[in-house]
Amino acid sequence: MPPLETIVYDISNQSLIEEYKGAIEYMASQFSDMFIYFLKLLMGSLWMISRPLYITIFMIGLIMYLSRFNRWVGRDLMMGGVILALVTEFIFPAVIEYLNTNYP
């Protein structure tokens, strides 16, 4: 039986370690590509969904505020619709553009 030092420092073991290291790096890069693709898909979907949503929220708030049904909730819904509109029209396109330019 060979001594333990020759087994541990054998050249074939080093190449095997390099192969495992390469496989792990490949899997990590594939996972990050998949994550970026999912993030792009999610941001695009949220952008399309949030446009009709902020209009609907604002209109419900406006109706509630003007009909004096519940002025405070109507005011809060209108503010939420405005904030969602700002996020949808300024933040989402900037993030989507950043993802498309840096991660093609």
Image (cartoon, grey):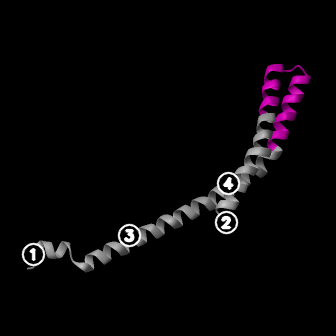
Q: Main secondary structure of the magenta part?
A: helix
Tell me if mark 1 has few (under 14), some (14-19) or many (20+) residues whose alpha carbon lies within 10 angstroms of its own: few
| Residue identified by numbered label 3 | 21
Residue 32: give its label.
none
Task: Return the disc, 1 or 4, that comes first in the chain's sequence.
Answer: 1
Residue 42: give its label.
4
In reply to whether residue 17 is colored magenta, the answer given is no
| Residue identified by numbered label 2 | 104
Quadrant in the rendering for residue 77? top right
Task: Return the disc, 4 or 3, that comes first in the chain's sequence.
Answer: 3
For the record, the magenta segment spans 53-80
* 35 horizontally vs 89: left or right: left
- Circle 4 SS class: helix
* 94 horizontally vs 59: left or right: left
| Residue 25 percent location from the top left of the image | 45, 67
Q: Residue at x 84, y 20 (%)?
A: 71
| Residue identified by numbered label 1 | 3
Task: Return the disc, 1 or 2, that comes first in the chain's sequence.
Answer: 1
Q: Residue at x 78, y 26 (%)?
A: 76
- Circle 2 SS class: loop
Tell me if mark 4 has few (under 14), some (14-19) or many (20+) residues whose alpha carbon lies within 10 angstroms of its own: few
| Residue type for callout 3 | Lys
| Residue 95 percent location from the top left of the image | 70, 51
Tell me if mark 3 has few (under 14), some (14-19) or many (20+) residues whose alpha carbon lies within 10 angstroms of its own: few
